[in-house]
């Protein structure tokens, strides 16, 4: 965007930037992509019971995408619990592998400040914890 001089807005999730919490969608993607398990059961948790193969890259793309969509309809604690359950089932967790691939690392404060100083990036507030703020999402508490 810098090369093309395209303005943008970056919404920061403070716990992610501080390294206190990974984005739940990243945790889910990492778990599915890195597991050695060949299938997962009950992947959509409360709504549908399925057994999906996840033995190769093509198979891993489908459950990751569909479960992300399903989890977005839950309240924040429910989808955090769901991702934790998936991590346990697949025996792989992003923050316990001893390294974090660059793709899952947050921007650091200096990178954010550099973006802000560029005049091309506006910095906005998201939340302290990663969650979906889509206005059309039906939350588990009826809101």
Image (cartoon, helix red, strand yellow):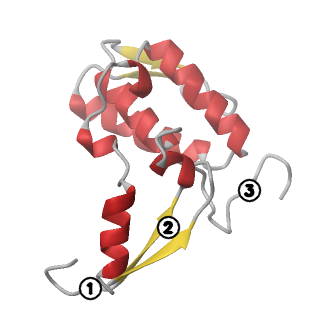
Disc 2 + disc 3, Cβ < 8 Å: no
Residue occupied by mark 3: 138
Q: Quadrant of the C terminus?
A: bottom right
Question: Does residue 33 appear anywhere in the picture?
Answer: yes
Name the one closer to the observer, 67 or 108: 108
Question: Distance of mark 1 from mark 2, alpha carbons?
Answer: 16 Å
Q: In which quarter of the image is the N terminus?
A: bottom left
> Mark 2 against mark 3, which lies toward the viewer?
2
Residue occupied by mark 2: 11
Question: Mark 1 or mark 3: which comes first in sequence?
Answer: 1
On residue 6, the disc is 1
At a point 65% along the width and 29% down the height, the residue shown is 81
Question: Mark 1 or mark 2: which comes first in sequence?
Answer: 1
Question: Distance of mark 1 from mark 3, alpha carbons?
Answer: 33 Å
Q: Residues within 10 Å of mark 2 (few under 14, many from 20)?
A: few
> Mark 1 against mark 3, which lies toward the viewer?
1
Where residue 39 sits in the image (x, y, percent)? 39, 16
Question: Mark 2 or mark 3: which comes first in sequence?
Answer: 2
53 sits left or right of 40 in the view: left
SS at mark 1? loop
At a point 58% along the width and 21% down the height, the residue shown is 85
Where residue 115 sits in the image (x, y, percent)? 32, 73
SS at mark 2? strand
């Amino acid at each position: 965007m810098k090369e093309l001089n395209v303005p943008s807005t970056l919404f920061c999730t403070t716990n992610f930037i501080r390294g206190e919490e990974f984005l739940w969608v990243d945790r889910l993607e990492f778990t599915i992509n890195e597991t050695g398990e060949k299938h997962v059961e009950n992947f959509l948790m409360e709504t549908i019971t399925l057994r999906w193969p996840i033995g190769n890259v093509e198979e891993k793309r489908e459950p990751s995408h569909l479960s992300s969509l399903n989890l977005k309809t839950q309240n924040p604690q429910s989808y955090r619990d769901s991702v934790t359950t998936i991590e346990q089932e697949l025996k792989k967790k992003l923050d316990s592998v001893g390294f974090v691939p660059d793709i899952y690392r947050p921007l650091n404060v200096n990178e954010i400040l550099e973006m802000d100083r560029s005049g091309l990036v506006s910095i906005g507030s998201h939340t302290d914890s990663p969650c979906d703020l889509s206005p059309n999402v039906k939350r588990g508490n009826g809101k």
